[in-house]
Amino acid sequence: MAMFYFANWKMYQSFVSIKKFVQDYKKYGLSNPHNDTYLGIAASYEHLYFLQQKLQRTSVLLGAQDCSFFLQGAYTGQVALQSLQEMQVSFCIIGHSEARRYLGHTDQDIFLKFKMLVAAGISPILSIGETLQQKESGQTLQVLCDQLEQVLQFLQSYQGDLIIFIAYEPLYAIGTGIVPQEKELRDVFYCLHSMIQQLPAQQNIRFLYGGSVSQSTIVQLKNIKEISGFLIGKASIDFQELKKIVES
Ligand code: PGA
């Protein structure tokens, strides 16, 4: 089963640090014994073209951290899907909790982006997750169902073969060093898998985990077979650290 490692560089990198990352990547590489490990990098917009040029002739997948739900026009500060396509971006994160929190993205906005990305042939990584308070009051599954509702409805009639990623990223795990207990994760991923059972595109839907993935948490996380990959924030900035996670 293929494993996907997506670096979510957020707003951590600069041109200088990216240059160093790519140099290290080219020098040390990643061991990929079964040829089924994929590395993707979601860079911020200002770095995308630069990174795309640097990663030419490598197998690294290029990704964006968000996109506009408008196609074109007078939308100051937004990023058009067409430009992402022209830069050969192959995936795009949508619904990240930081975008929901700081930019006010709603489930409706995220659904519009999801449909546009699918139509454009760019794999969405739809990020979902509950707060600590919601978890403690037993609402985890309800929150996830609500965040997925429109997307699952849409997927009932989707017959295409694009890979669609759903990333479970509990908010209390992002950037805190805390990861959910193994049993909690198994329960969540079991439910997520059962939600997609009847969908025509079921084979192409992959579940990721995100939130404090690091050298010290990855081994336990890899035990959970229902997880097909990881969305890695802070620990993905330095190539050597990321390499250890991928190769653990
Ligand atoms: P983190 O972030 O690995 O720094 O916790 C993950 C994410 O927000 O995608």
Image (cartoon, rainbow, N blue to C red):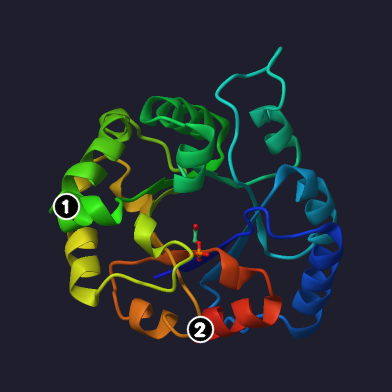
Q: Is residue 23 left or right of residue 146?
A: right
Label 1 SS: helix
**Residue toward you, 18 or 105:** 105
Q: Residues within 10 Å of mark 1 (few under 14, many from 20)?
A: few
Expressed as whole percent of the image width and height from the top left, the position of residue 141 reads 18, 49
| Residue that mark 2 sits on | 215
Q: Nearer the viewer, mark 2 or mark 1?
A: 2
Residue kind at label 1, given as amino acid type: Ser
Q: Residue at x 63, y 19 (%)?
A: 71
* Quarter of the image that includes the N terminus: bottom left
- Cα distance, mark 2 to mark 1? 30 Å
Q: Residue at x 72, y 21 (%)?
A: 76
Residue kind at label 2, given as amino acid type: Gln
Q: Quadrant of residue 27?
A: bottom right
Q: How many marks?
A: 2
Q: Quadrant of residue 168?
A: bottom left
The CB of the residue at mark 2 lies under 8 Å from ligand 1: no
**Residue toward you, 214 or 178:** 178
Give the answer, above or below, for where 5 lies relative to 148: below
| Residue that mark 1 sits on | 194
